[in-house]
Image (cartoon, helix red, strand yellow):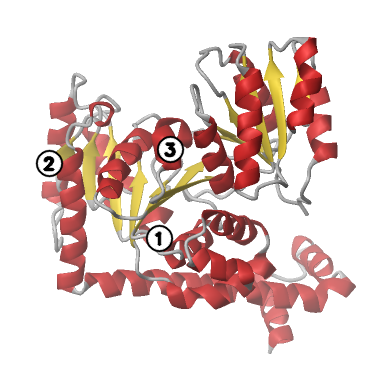
Amino acid sequence: MELIQRMLLGEKRACARLITTVENDPEEAEKIIREVQKYTGNAHVIGITGPPGAGKSTLVDKMVKVLADKGNKVGIIAVDPTSPYSGGSILGDRIRMQDLAVNPNVFIRSMGTRGYLGGLSKYTKNALKILDAAGYDYIIIETVGVGQSEVDIVKTADTVVMVMVPGLGDDIQSIKAGIMEIGDIFVINKSDLFGADRTATEINMMLDLSMNMDRRPPVMKVTASKGEGIDSLISEIKSHINFLKTSGNFEKRRSDNMKLEVMDLIESELKKIVISRTANENKLETEVGKILNKEKNMYEVRDEFLKLIG
Amino acid sequence: MRPIRVLIAKPGLDGHDRGAKVIARALRDAGMEVIYTGLRQTPEQIVAAAVQEDADVVGLSILSGAHNYLFPRVVDLMKKQGADDVLIIGGGVIPEDDIPGLKKEGIAEIFTPGTTTTQMIDFIKSNLKRTVN
C-alpha cells in the first residue's frame, strides 16, 4: 500500500491516515498491521498514568521537549474519555502541548476511549504499532485519568510512570491493589503543594513493604509546570529500560504482552466464527431461552456452540 | 460509521474561549470527537495539529478582528500539506461584509452570533469532504 510506504518514510499525514484506519476499521487494520508489524518493536514505549488532573499532559509536554531536543523522534498517544451517552468526546490533552505540535520530531494523536474501560481505547495498540513502524524512538501513551483499576497500560508499555499528586487520600489508598502496583516509576507531581513530602513518604513506605521485587521503583518529586525534576525523571526512565534489558525482563514483558494480544485475537476470531455459523437460525436466542426456562445450563449451551467450530 | 473528528482552535491573540468551548461541548453531544487545542494558536500549530489528528473538520473561533488574515492563512497551509479534503469553518464576531471574502478564500461557512448549535451540527454533517463510513 502506498500509504504505508509514505508512513515508513516518515510522512506525518500518511501516519495520521493509517492511525484513523486502524482505529476504526478492523478489517483494514488487519491488512495494514500484517504489513507493518515487521517494522515494529524498536520504540521504547512509556506509559503515563494517574488520576484526572494530576498533570499528566503537562508532564508529557515537558518530558517530550527534553527528549526531542536531544534529537529523538517522539510519538504521543493521548487518550481521553468518550461519552457513554453520545459517543462523542472532548480530547483536550493537546492544550498542554501546543508548542510540540510544530516540532518536526514529534507526532501527537488524541484518542477517545470509545467505551473501553482499561484506561486506553481498544485500538490504542494498533495506533502504537503504526507510530513504532514510522520510526519514533520513544512513544508515550497518556492514559485517561484513572481511578483504581485501569491497568491496561502495564500490558502495553515497557515503562509505566504513575503520576500522583499530594492530598488525594491517606496511606491506605497506597496499599490497595490495582494501579498502585503497576508503576515502574512513581512521580509526585505538583510537589510545590503542601503535603508532597507526606505523599512521597506514604508511597515509599508502601513500596518498602513489597517483597519479591527485582527492582524497587523510585519515587520522584516533580513540578511539571515549572519544569522541575524532569531531567531526573528522564534518567530514571532510561535506567528502567536498561534494567529491563540487562535483567532479561525486557523480552519477558514484551512476550507476555504479545501473548495477551494474540489470545485476544484468537478469542475475537472464534466469536466471529461462532456468530457467523449461527447467524441464520437465531440459535443464540433459542438457547438462551432454554437457559432462562431452566431446561439447560449455560455450560451445556457453550459446549454446543463450540461443537460448531469442532 | 466512525465518529466525525473536529479540531476546534482559537487562532491569534484573543483570550475569549467561551464560544469555542460551547461549540466543542455541543459537537461532543452530537457524537463527534472534538480535539480542543486551546488558546493563542498560530496557523502553523493549528494545521500541524489538524494533520496529526487527521481531522475531518477544522473549526476556527476568533473574536479579535484578525480573521481576514488568520483564516486564509490556515486554508493556505492546509493546502500546502495536501489536506484539501478537510472542511474548514469559522465563527466569532465577524462583520457581514467580510464573509464573502472569507468564503472565497476557502472557509466553507462563517457562523456569527445567533447561530444555533443545531445549525452548525447539520452544516458539518452535510458538508463533510470525506466519507466517515
Q: Which residue type does callout 3 highlight?
A: Gly
In the picture as drawn, the residue positioned furthest to the bottom comes out as A310
Lateral position of residue A179 relative to residue A302, left or right: left
Q: Chain of mark 2?
A: A
CB of mark 3 within 8 Å of CB of mark 2? no
Q: Is residue B43 above or below residue A139?
A: above
Q: Nearer the N terminus, badge 3 or badge 2?
A: 3
Any part of residue B107 in sight: no
Disc marking residue A181: none
Between B98 and A193, the residue placed more toward the observer is: B98
Which residue is rendered at x = 41% and y = 31% of the image?
A: A96
Residue at coordinates 77% horizontally, 69% vertically from top-left?
A295
Query: Chain for mark 3?
Result: A
The secondary element bearing badge 1 is classed as: loop
Residue A250 location in percent, x, y?
26, 70
> In the figure, is residue A283 to the left or right of A14?
right
Task: Check disc 1 and give the amino acid type.
Answer: Thr
Residue B59 can be seen in this image? yes
Question: Which residue is denoted by mark 2 in the rendering?
Answer: A205
Q: Quadrant of the N terminus of chain A?
A: bottom right
How many badges with numbers are in the image? 3
How far from the left and from the top, in percent, is residue B45? 50, 35
Q: Secondary structure at mark 2?
A: helix
* Res A145 label: 3
Q: Which residue is mark 1?
A: A156
Please tell me how crowded label 3 is: few (under 14), some (14-19), or many (20+) other residues with Cα within 10 Å: many
Find residue A241 and report its image quarter: bottom left
Closer to the chain start, of discs 1 and 2, is: 1
Q: Is residue B118 above or below residue B81?
A: above
